[in-house]
Amino acid sequence: MRASRNNEHISGAERIASASDMHKTVSELINRALSHEIGEPDEINISVESLKQEKIKKLKALNIATISVADYKQGRLCASKLLELIGISKKAIKMAVDYMENGAPPDKKNMRGAMIIDCKTGKRIEPDRYRGIRASRMDIAKEAEAKLTSTLKKAKINNPYIREAIVLATKVANAPDTIAEICWSDDPSYQAGYIASKRFGYVRFPYLKEKGSPFGGRAFFVDAKKIDLKKYINFLEQQAILITRIGRCKPPVNWNTFLNEAVIPAP
Ligand code: WAQ
Ligand code: MG
């Protein structure tokens, strides 16, 4: 589903469901499109297609960590340090953050999809800078979702933003060639964001953007020299992914504790 007003992206969502749940799922998506905090859309697109069971790749969700930060500035600082540890250059980090803060597409609105950014130069390599690349065809199985919800509830961080972001981030992190992802919401009231990678999992920051900012986005960091871009985009858009197992969810820690626990000291 994607919803827009005046051709401006408002919200989008992806589901994988059994045929018997089609009516229910589509009506949930319509409700979702109509109840966004930005306002009502004037256009809703819902597309439904059949998917063969055997085409669906099953994955375990990324482990979840939360780093306590006082405000979005501290959040940005820690998120940048984490990206550096993963191997993203300072320049590429700054470029991604600047784009996300000021409106990433040339018309300075919000993109429907994500930027793809070279981890060294910071150059954007996605073919359409207005639209970006939209990861699609992914969802979480009902049992795994129930477990994830109860795990997030125990950690007092349960909300639909996180549940959906974990599904997306797990797919993106498992795409061959993804080095890391940075994300924060475009919803003005939602300040949390995350850095996801196979190495560190889904690492949340309760504040990653200024309150009230209408700008958000996603950037997938890759090595432009090594990547087969067509294949990469094809995986993100076409490969069906179902999360069937969940990962660990640690209680919030400060940055130093996170580092001590996460980084295995050199021998
Ligand atoms: N594929 C690629 N990019 C996407 C997709 C997708 N399927 N969906 C959204 N985006 C991009 C797009 O540029 C949006 O403007 C931007 O991401 C933000 O989307 O753990 O709610 O749906 O508490 O607003 C992070 C959760 C929430 C943090 C992220 O993103 C936490 C969120 P939103
Ligand atoms: Mg949003």
Image (tube, rainbow, N blue to C red):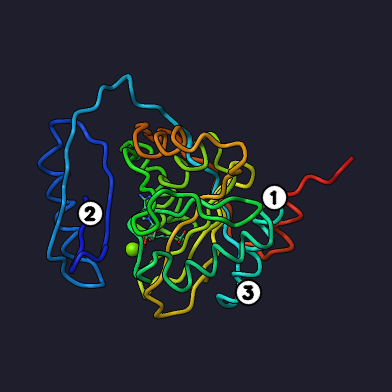
Crowd around label 1: few <14 · some 14–19 · many ≥20 (10 Å): some
Placement of 34 over or under 20, stated as above or below: below
Q: Is residue 157 visible?
A: yes
Give the SS element for disc 1: loop
Verify CB contact (< 8 Å) between mark 3 and mark 2: no
Which amino acid type is shown beneath numbered disc 3?
Gln
Instruction: Decide which of tag 3 and tag 2 comes sooner along the chain.
Output: 2
Q: Position of residue 53 (x, y in %)?
A: 28, 22
Q: Nearer the viewer, mark 3 or mark 2?
A: 2
Which amino acid type is shown beneath numbered disc 2?
Arg
- Residue at numbered disc 2: 2
Between 8 and 161, the one nearer to me in the picture: 8
- Residue at numbered disc 1: 87
Instruction: Decide which of tag 1 and tag 3 comes sooner along the chain.
Output: 3
Residue drawn 40% across the image and 27% down it: 57
Between 48 and 58, the one nearer to me in the picture: 48
Residue drawn 58% across the image and 50% down it: 118
Q: Give the side of residue 69 with respect to residue 235, left or right.
A: right
Task: State the separation of the CA atoms marked 1 and 3.
Answer: 20 Å
- Residue at numbered disc 3: 74
Where ligand 2 lies, by image quadrant? bottom left
Quadrant containing the C terminus is top right
